[in-house]
């Protein structure tokens, strides 16, 4: 009887070790699969970052931030400026080191309202210095691409938060510090507001075909 109990106990321990090993292996596989999926997403959705106008500090911070494993929520593009930037869920220092961030308190990417998006003036958003009224902004999110046209360009103080107010139309507001080449903490904010063109909301496949035809 004691021999049988000992055998059962040893068998239970062996099964436990096998299950523990299987769990650990599955977890490592899931983590590696997640990393591969993120890498594939970035490769498919984004080209290499154009760092031509970036400061040295921003280039270094971006390289370090790329080690993170999560994918952006959206991609913001302004073809006329050759601007292409990943958009993350908030404006933490970490997220702004690797792209742009949705400003807390503004509309989320899947609801109507004014979506506020911020990025550094010495990184991705330095290209906004050449923005013009009428330029097209594409915001790609969850398989859809929304088309906006720049309707307002302004320079404000940090206290002028009304630029992020909801308004009466669906819009996107891009925010960065100003002047673009100011040494130290820039005192003002550069604002680009775009209004949604509801006649030109595409799914991803439609946009890709249109971009190829128009060679934007």
Image (cartoon, rainbow, N blue to C red):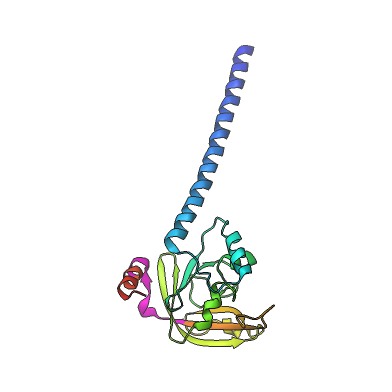
> From where the camera sits, is residue 115 visible?
no
Picture residue at 37% right of the left edge, 67% below the top: 204
| Residue 23 versus residue 183 in the image, above or below | above
Report the number of numbered marks: 0
As for residue 188 lying within the magenta part, the answer is no
Q: On the image, which quarter does residue 58 sit in?
A: bottom right
Q: On the image, which quarter does residue 90 sit in?
A: bottom right
Q: Nearer the viewer, residue 110 or 209?
A: 209
Picture residue at 62% right of the left edge, 87% below the top: 156
Q: Nearer the viewer, residue 96 or 2?
A: 96
The residue most toward the right is 184
In the rendered image, the quadrant that contains the N terminus is top right
> From where the camera sits, is residue 6 visible?
yes
Q: Which residues are magenta?
A: 195-206
In the rendered image, the quadrant that contains the C terminus is bottom left
Q: Position of residue 22 (x, y in %)?
A: 53, 35
| Residue 187 versus residue 38 in the image, above or below | below
Q: Position of residue 83 (x, y in %)?
A: 47, 73
């Amino acid at each position: 009887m004691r021999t049988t109990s000992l055998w059962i106990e040893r068998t239970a321990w062996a099964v436990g070790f096998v299950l523990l090993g299987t769990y650990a292996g599955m977890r490592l596989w899931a983590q590696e699969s997640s990393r591969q999926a993120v890498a594939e997403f970035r490769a498919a959705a984004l080209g290499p970052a154009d760092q031509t106008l970036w400061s040295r500090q921003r280039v270094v911070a971006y390289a370090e931030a790329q080690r993170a494993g999560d994918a952006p929520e959206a991609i913001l593009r302004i073809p006329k400026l050759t601007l292409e930037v990943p958009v993350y869920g908030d404006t933490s220092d970490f997220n702004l080191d690797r792209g742009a961030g949705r400003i807390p308190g503004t509309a989320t990417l899947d609801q109507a309202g004014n979506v506020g998006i911020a990025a550094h003036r010495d990184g991705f958003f330095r290209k906004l210095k050449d923005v013009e009224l009428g330029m097209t902004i594409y915001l790609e999110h969850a398989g859809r691409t929304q088309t906006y046209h720049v309707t307002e360009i302004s320079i404000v103080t940090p206290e002028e938060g009304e630029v992020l107010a909801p308004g009466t139309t669906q819009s996107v507001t891009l925010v960065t510090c100003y002047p673009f080449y100011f040494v130290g903490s820039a005192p003002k904010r550069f604002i680009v507001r775009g209004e949604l063109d509801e006649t030109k909301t595409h799914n991803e496949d439609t946009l890709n075909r249109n971009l190829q035809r128009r060679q934007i």
